[in-house]
Image (cartoon, coloured by chain):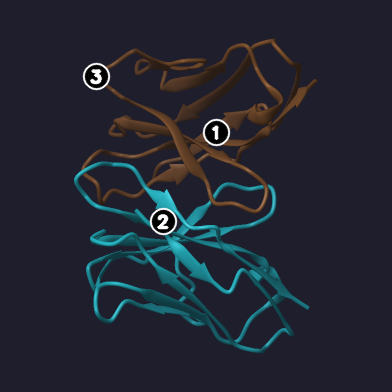
Chain colours: A brown, B cyan
Amino acid sequence: GENVEQHPSTLSVQEGDSAVIKCTYSDSASNYFPWYKQELGKGPQLIIDIRSNVGEKKDQRIAVTLNKTAKHFSLHITETQPEDSAVYFCAASMTGGYQKVTFGTGTKLQVIP
Amino acid sequence: EAGVAQSPRYKIIEKRQSVAFWCNPISGHATLYWYQQILGQGPKLLIQFQNNGVVDDSQLPKDRFSAERLKGVDSTLKIQPAKLEDSAVYLCASTSGRTDTQYFGPGTRLTVL
């Protein structure tokens, strides 16, 4: 089955700096890569996703890149703010709506004011 | 639209007792997932329903865990008897199938003493 590895497990940045979280996956059949943000006491919430036919996607301060050959993808957050502090999970699956999603182990991001 | 509802939010039980969790997905979402999230880890899929049928329960410990979605809407996850290692947050998610986005509920935090 699919295996997703995520690094780093914790990340502290100063407010305004950038944060980068990296993930690798094992199953070359995976073609959908969502990123979730989980705040304390809440369920994960989708913040951005990318499909394998796209190399990069951006939404305001958040961007994701995908390297299918190397089987890795990354989340980039620019101009970090204290409200970005949370646990971030990468995930991999196949598209189709009913496919199993495999999550990474999470990165706890702390933005220091 | 209303999000995914889960109850209870917290539950503390003794080992060998039984416990049940309830989930009501977003209206119209045919696919429902139960995940187990152990502290410091990513969500792990326990079972996936498509309407009232099971799509994937390969990681469900069937000797103690059971789940049902009788009318294809809300769902119940049961643990009987509970073990210490079952202490975790149990997340419910749903998707319409028209997109790949999974919407998560707030979770139920289970503590087994």
Residue extending furthest toward the front: B1
Residue A87 vs B67, above or below: the answer is above
Q: Amino acid at mark 2?
A: Gly
Q: Position of residue A82 (x, y in %)?
A: 71, 26
Which residue is found at the position 22% from the left and 50% from the top? B97
Q: Which residue is mark 3?
A: A53
**Mark 2, secondary structure of its residue:** loop
Chain at tag 2: B
Tell me what residue is drawn at x 57 percent, y 17 percent: A77
Mark 3 vs mark 2, CA separation in Å = 30 Å
Residue with the mark numbered 1: A5
Where does the image place residue A12, in percent across and percent down from the top left?
76, 23
Secondary structure state at the residue bearing disc 1: strand
Q: Earlier in the sequence, mark 1 or mark 3?
A: 1
A70 on left or right of B113: left
User: With respect to residue B109, does A72 lie above or below?
Assistant: above
Could you classify mark 1 by the number of other residues whose Cα lies within 10 Å: few (under 14), some (14-19), or many (20 or more)?
some
Note whether A55 is above or below B21 in the view shown.
Answer: above
Please say if the residues under marks 2 and 1 sit with CB atoms less than 8 Å apart: no
Front residue of A110 and A71: A110
Question: Which corner quadrant of the image does residue A65 belong to?
Answer: top left
Q: Report the front residue among B1 and B26.
A: B1
- Determine which residue is flagged by label 2: B3
Badge 1: chain ID? A
What amino acid is found at the position of numbered circle 1 in the picture? Glu
* Chain letter for mark 3: A
